[in-house]
Image (cartoon, rainbow, N blue to C red):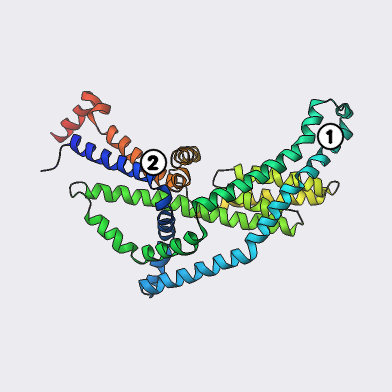
Amino acid sequence: MALPIREQVKYWSIALAVFFVALWVLGGVILPFLVGGAVAYFLDPVADRLERAGLSRVAATSVITAGALLIVVALVLAVIPTLVNQLTALVNAAPDIALRLQTFLLERFPELADGTSTIRQSLAQIGQTIQSKGAALAEGLLTSLASAISIVVFLLVVPVVAFYLLLDWDHMVARLDQLLPRDHAPTIRRLGREIDGALSAFVRGQLSVCLVLGLYYSAALMLAGLQFGLVVGATAGAITFIPYVGAIIGGALAIGLALFQFWGDWVQIGIVGAIFAVGQFLEGNVLTPKLVGKSVGLHPVWLLFALSAFGTLFGFVGMLVAVPVAAALGVLTRFAIGQYHGSLLYQGIAGRIPEDEDQA
């Protein structure tokens, strides 16, 4: 005999509370395991395809690990130093950029030449503020990152955890299926498939879109001769998961830098603008429809709320679990709405009469 609904709700609520308490208390401890689990989840479809191609699970996992290692080494040796150097140069060049902006404005608005002008004083402080705050922000991020995530953890623990989870992924899923309450197993499986579909479609798809656009923007801007093109391209690609925001922010930053670098060369400035126009067209008409799809069910506003809320409550670990939790809550909310629409609370007595008459 199944437990009453009230008892089931009580036990599931206790389990959920224990989960959030553990997330809050053990955040720093479970971080490498969460990262390793996320990596294994993202790479499991690749391992399944390699298995279908004839490889064993061990061989598929080994091939994926070797490929990931080569990619990481290539990034460390080639891309990351250039990105850091350009970011540092951009922060250091902020005072000169602000000074050139001030000169440009003074030429067209002579009234700003008044030394006591609030606007002029503010413009004069923009560069120093950006430089000091940018340096402090970079130092704070590096300090926090070093304290929360040691190099040893990311070089050893995360890859090892990801390897073993990826190796045993199908077995773990089968074991979890055996632990499901028998009365609700079919419903939980269906909801799990929907959550996995929404999560995989959004995360894997958006990561692919961000990566492709980041590479495109970075390469195109660097070929166009724009200084700090790698930084601008990486920034635009990283925030592409919010529709139009990545192109707007990246485009504004790139065009602003192009105005200072290529002032008077309107063809070159137009090329920089055209790069983002083409990128926006590719994102909206090719990449997002192909890689993400239209039935994901994760609205950007809901995603931002989840990231903000979980990041505030649980820190960096909360941001890692925000997307899967948001996907799960979205699926569960749609399921609850469907149950509500079929309930007496929604339909009322009048809504039940035609159904009873049809059955009679």
Q: Is residue 296 visible?
A: no
- Nearer to me, 60 or 276: 60
Quadrant (top left, top right, bottom left, bottom right) of the N terminus: top left
Residue type marked 1: Leu
In x, y percent, where is residue 179?
Answer: 22, 53
Q: In the rendered view, would you say 112 is above or below 194?
A: above
Q: Give the mark nearest the N terminus, 1 or 2.
A: 1
Q: Is residue 101 visible?
A: yes
Extreme residue toward the left, this view: 1
- Nearer to me, 123 or 252: 123
The residue at 60%/42% (across/down) is 245
- Front tag of 1 and 2: 1
Q: Is residue 128 left or right of residue 286?
A: right
Check disc 1 and report the residue beneath it.
105
Residue type marked 2: Gly
In x, y percent, where is residue 352?
Answer: 20, 28
The residue at 80%/52% (across/down) is 268
- Nearer to me, 74 or 218: 74
In x, y percent, where is residue 148?
Answer: 49, 51
Quadrant (top left, top right, bottom left, bottom right) of the C terminus: top left
